[in-house]
C-alpha cells in the first residue's frame, strides 16, 4: 500500500514538475490591438504570433519551454501599465514586448524599470530610453530615417514649398515632423505653413482651404495613416492639385492608408523600415507565411513585430537554461547583427540601446509600395 | 481624376476669396452642428433632460447608413434609414434610460448618469461591430462635383449638406409650432399635469420629442460620415462636447438659439483654424465663448429660466 502511495505521489510530483516546466519561461506582449494605434498593434501582434510559432516549430527554445501571453491595452496608457504590472507580478514574465506608441511607452517605461523587467516597445522617441536600462525600442531614431526622407525629398523630389501637418498629441509624430522640417529647410525648401491637429480630428475643411491657399506643392502628413488619407481627400475636394507631392511618416506604408485614400494618395513617399519584396531568405519566408496566414501582405509594423519576437527569443535562448529578467535584459542589450526582417536584414542595438537596421524610401505606385 | 485648382486671382482678390471660402466652410460645418444641437436642445428645452447619449445616436446613424451602402443599397435609402433608426434608438433610450427616472421625479440629474451609461453601451456595441476600425463610405458614394463662383469652391456635397440641414430644421420648426402634435409637445413641456388633464398623453409626447431628436442626430451622423470620410465608434464624442457648447451659447432650450449658436460656432472654429496658430484653436474658441457668456450669461437667445420652449405658448 505504501509503495502504491509512494508511486502515486511520485507521479503527481512528476506531473506537477512537468506542468511547472511547461510554464517555465513566459514572454508578455502588451500591444494596442484596438484603439488609436491598432494600425500598429494589430499587424505587429499577428507577426509576433507567427514568429513565436515559427521558432517553436523549429524547436528554437529547446530544452526550455517558453510561452507567450498576448494582451490588448486598447492603445491606452493606463491599461498598458496595469497589464505590464499584472504580467510581471502574477504571471512572472521575463520580458515585455510593447506597448505601441511613444505616449504609452513613456507612461509605462518607469513601471517596467521599477519592476525590473525588460520592456521592448515600438515607440519612436528615444526619450523613452531615458527611463532606465530596462527599456528598449524597435525603430531607429527619427533622426536617422527622417533625415533620409528629408534629404530625398529636398534633393530628388525638390518641391518649392511644403505644408506641414502633424498631430500634436503624440511625441513621436512631433519629433519626426521637427526633424523632417529642419532637413527640408537646410535643403532649401520653403515651409509654407506648419499646422497641428489632434489624433481624433476628422473635419479638415478649414485646414484644407488654408493648405490650398498656401500654394504649397508638397504636403507632409505627420498623422496616423487613415487620418492622413482623410486629409488628402478633403484637400483634393478643397482644390489641391493632384500633382502635389505627398510625404508621409513610417506609419503610412500600410494598407490602411492605401484603402482609406485610394487613388488620391498615389505617389506618396514614405520612410520605410521594411522592403515589401524582402531583402533576405528570412524576410521572404516571413512575407510568404504572413500572407498565407493572415490573408494580406505584411507591412512595416508586422516586420517590427516579427523582429521584436526574434530579438527577445534570441535573448531568452542566450540567457538560458534558466533565464531571469536581468539576464534577458543583458542579452537583449547585446543584440548585434541579428538576422531579421527589418531594413537591410540585420538588427543591432548599440551601447546606448539605439537600434540600427537601415531605412529605405518607398513610393506608392499602382497601389504598391516600391523603391522610387 | 482630380484636377489642379488655380483661382487665377490677384493676391487681394484671392485673400477675399479665401475668407469667403472659409466662411462657407464654417456655415456648412455649422449646419451639421445645428442638426445635432437642435435634437440635443429639443429634449433639454422641452423635458429638462440632458441626454448625453445623443452622440451615440449620431454615431448609430452613420453606422446604419454605412452598412446600408455597404449592402449595395443607395445612399438616399441609407439616409432615410439612419433618420428612422436614429429616431427609434432615441425613443428606446427614453423608454429604457429616462422613463422610470421621469416618473420618480429625479430626471434632471439622474438622466445625466443614465445617459452616460446608455452612451457607453452604444459605443461598446459599435466598437464590437466595427472591430475598432475607422470606416468610410466607399469612393463614389457621393459624386465629387465642384462648382466655382468668384473664386469660391462649393462642392455638391456641401450643397447637399446645407440643403439637408435647412430642410430638416424647417420641418422641425413646422412640426413644433404649426401642428397639433407640436402644440401637445409644448403643452407637456409647459405643464405636464395640466396637459394630461386636457387629454394629452405625455408618453406619446415624449415619444415624439425623442424621435425628432434622434432623427436629427441620425441625419447629422450620415452627413458627418460623408463630409469627413470617417465613421467610427467614437465619432459622436466631439459632437457631444461641441453640441453642449452650442446650446449653452445659443441659450439652453432655445431652438433659434441652437441654430444661431451652431452657425456661429462653425464659423468661429473655421476662421480660427484658417487664420490663427492651429494649436491655439480650441483655447481661442472657448475664450470667445467665455466672453460672449460674460455679456449674455443665458446665451445669445436664452432667457433666465432654462428651457425656453417650456414657457412659450
Image (cartoon, rainbow, N blue to C red):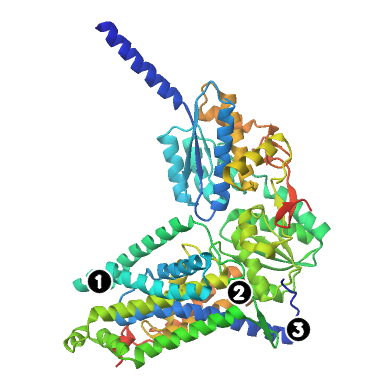
Find numbered disc 3 in the image and state the secondary structure of the residue it sits on.
Answer: helix
Which residue lies at the image location 45% right of the left edge and 84% below the top edge? Answer: B168
Where residue B119 sits: x, y (%)? 37, 64
Mark before the other along the chain sequence, 3 or 1: 3
How would you rate the neighbour count of disc 2 (Cα within 10 Å): few for under 14, some for 14-19, many for 20 or more?
Answer: many
Check disc 3 and report the residue beneath it.
Answer: B11
Q: Nearer the viewer, residue A273 or A78?
A: A273
The residue that disc 2 covers is A205
Residue A259: horizontal and vertical position, in percent? 62, 59
From mark 1 to mark 2, how far is it between C-alphas? 40 Å
Which numbered disc, 2 or 3, marks the residue closer to the eye? 2
B131 with respect to B15 (left or right): left
Measure the C-alpha gap from mark 2 to mark 3.
21 Å
Residue depicted at x 69% and y 62%? A265
Q: CB of mark 3 within 8 Å of CB of mark 1? A: no
Residue B196 visible in the picture: yes
Residue picked out by circle 1: B99
Q: To which quarter of the image does residue B195 belong? A: bottom left
* Circle 3 or circle 1, nearest the eye: 1
Comparing marks 1 and 2, which lies closer to the viewer?
A: 1
Residue at 27% x, 70% y is B95
The secondary element bearing badge 1 is classed as helix
Location of residue A290 in the rendering, given as x and y in whole percent from the top left corner: 61, 41
Q: Are marks 2 and 3 in contact (CB under 8 Å)?
A: no
The answer to whether residue A136 is above or below residue A15 is: below
Amino acid at each position: 500500500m505504501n509503495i502504491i502511495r509512494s508511486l502515486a505521489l511520485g507521479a503527481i510530483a512528476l506531473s506537477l514538475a512537468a506542468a511547472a516546466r511547461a510554464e517555465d519561461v513566459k514572454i508578455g506582449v502588451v500591444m494596442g490591438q484596438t484603439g488609436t494605434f491598432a494600425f500598429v498593434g494589430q499587424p505587429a501582434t499577428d507577426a509576433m504570433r507567427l514568429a513565436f510559432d515559427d521558432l517553436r516549430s523549429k524547436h528554437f527554445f529547446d530544452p526550455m519551454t517558453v510561452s507567450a501571453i498576448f494582451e490588448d491595452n486598447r492603445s491606452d496608457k493606463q491599461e498598458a501599465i496595469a497589464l505590464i504590472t499584472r504580467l510581471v507580478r502574477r504571471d512572472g514574465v521575463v520580458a515585455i514586448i510593447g506597448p505601441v506608441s511613444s505616449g504609452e511607452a513613456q507612461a509605462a517605461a518607469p513601471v517596467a524599470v521599477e519592476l525590473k523587467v525588460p520592456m521592448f516597445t515600438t515607440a519612436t522617441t528615444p526619450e523613452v530610453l531615458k527611463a532606465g536600462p530596462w527599456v528598449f525600442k524597435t525603430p531607429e531614431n527619427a533622426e536617422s530615417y527622417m533625415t533620409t526622407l528629408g534629404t530625398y525629398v529636398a534633393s530628388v523630389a525638390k518641391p518649392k514649398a511644403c505644408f506641414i501637418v502633424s498631430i500634436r498629441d503624440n511625441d513621436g509624430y512631433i519629433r519626426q515632423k521637427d526633424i523632417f522640417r529642419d532637413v527640408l529647410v537646410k535643403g532649401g525648401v520653403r515651409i509654407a505653413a506648419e499646422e497641428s491637429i489632434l489624433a481624433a480630428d476628422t473635419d479638415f475643411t478649414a485646414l484644407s482651404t488654408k493648405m490650398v491657399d498656401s500654394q504649397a506643392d508638397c504636403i507632409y502628413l505627420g498623422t496616423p495613416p487613415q487620418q492622413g488619407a482623410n486629409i488628402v481627400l478633403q484637400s483634393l475636394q478643397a482644390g489641391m492639385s493632384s500633382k502635389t507631392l505627398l510625404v508621409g511618416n513610417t506609419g503610412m506604408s500600410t494598407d490602411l492608408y492605401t484603402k482609406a485614400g485610394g487613388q488620391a494618395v498615389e505617389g506618396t513617399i514614405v520612410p520605410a523600415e521594411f522592403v515589401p519584396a524582402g531583402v533576405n531568405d528570412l524576410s521572404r519566408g516571413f512575407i510568404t507565411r504572413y500572407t498565407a496566414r493572415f490573408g494580406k501582405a505584411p507591412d512595416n509594423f508586422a516586420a517590427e513585430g516579427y523582429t521584436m519576437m526574434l530579438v527577445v527569443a534570441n535573448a531568452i535562448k542566450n540567457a538560458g537554461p534558466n533565464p531571469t529578467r536581468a539576464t534577458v535584459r543583458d542579452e537583449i542589450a547585446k543584440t548585434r547583427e541579428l538576422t531579421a526582417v527589418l531594413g537591410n536584414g540585420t538588427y543591432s542595438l548599440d551601447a546606448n540601446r539605439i537600434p540600427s537596421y537601415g531605412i529605405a524610401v518607398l513610393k506608392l505606385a499602382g497601389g504598391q509600395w516600391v523603391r522610387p | 481624376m482630380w484636377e489642379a485648382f488655380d483661382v487665377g486671382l490677384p493676391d487681394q482678390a484671392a485673400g477675399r476669396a479665401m475668407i469667403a471660402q472659409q466662411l462657407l466652410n464654417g456655415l456648412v460645418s455649422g449646419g451639421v452642428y445645428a442638426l445635432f444641437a437642435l435634437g440635443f436642445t429639443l429634449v433639454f428645452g422641452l423635458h429638462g433632460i440632458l441626454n448625453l447619449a445623443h452622440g451615440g445616436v449620431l454615431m448609430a446613424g452613420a453606422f446604419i447608413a454605412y452598412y446600408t451602402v455597404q449592402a449595395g443599397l443607395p445612399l438616399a435609402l441609407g439616409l432615410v434609414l439612419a433618420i428612422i433608426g436614429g429616431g427609434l434608438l432615441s425613443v428606446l433610450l427614453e423608454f429604457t434610460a429616462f422613463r422610470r427616472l421621469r416618473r420618480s421625479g429625479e430626471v434632471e440629474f439622474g438622466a445625466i448618469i443614465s445617459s452616460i451609461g446608455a452612451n457607453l453601451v452604444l459605443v461598446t456595441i459599435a466598437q464590437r461591430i466595427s472591430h475598432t476600425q475607422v470606416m468610410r463610405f466607399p469612393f463614389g458614394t457621393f459624386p465629387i462635383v465642384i462648382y466655382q463662383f468668384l473664386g469660391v469652391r462649393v462642392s455638391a456635397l456641401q450643397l447637399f449638406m446645407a440643403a439637408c440641414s435647412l430642410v430638416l430644421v424647417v420641418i422641425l420648426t413646422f412640426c413644433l409650432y404649426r401642428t397639433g402634435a407640436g402644440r401637445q409637445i409644448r403643452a407637456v413641456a409647459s405643464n405636464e399635469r395640466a396637459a394630461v388633464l386636457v387629454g394629452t398623453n405625455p408618453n406619446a409626447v415624449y415619444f415624439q420629442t425623442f424621435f425628432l431628436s434622434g432623427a436629427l442626430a441620425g441625419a447629422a451622423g450620415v452627413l458627418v460620415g460623408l463630409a469627413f470620410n470617417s465613421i467610427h465608434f467614437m465619432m459622436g464624442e466631439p459632437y457631444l462636447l461641441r453640441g453642449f457648447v452650442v446650446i449653452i451659447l445659443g441659450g439652453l432650450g432655445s431652438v433659434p438659439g441652437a441654430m444661431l449658436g451652431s452657425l456661429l460656432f462653425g464659423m468661429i472654429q473655421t476662421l480660427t483654424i484658417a487664420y490663427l496658430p492651429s494649436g491655439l484653436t480650441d483655447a481661442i474658441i472657448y475664450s470667445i465663448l467665455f466672453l460672449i457668456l460674460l455679456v449674455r450669461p443665458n446665451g445669445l437667445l436664452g432667457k433666465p429660466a432654462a428651457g425656453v420652449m417650456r414657457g412659450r405658448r
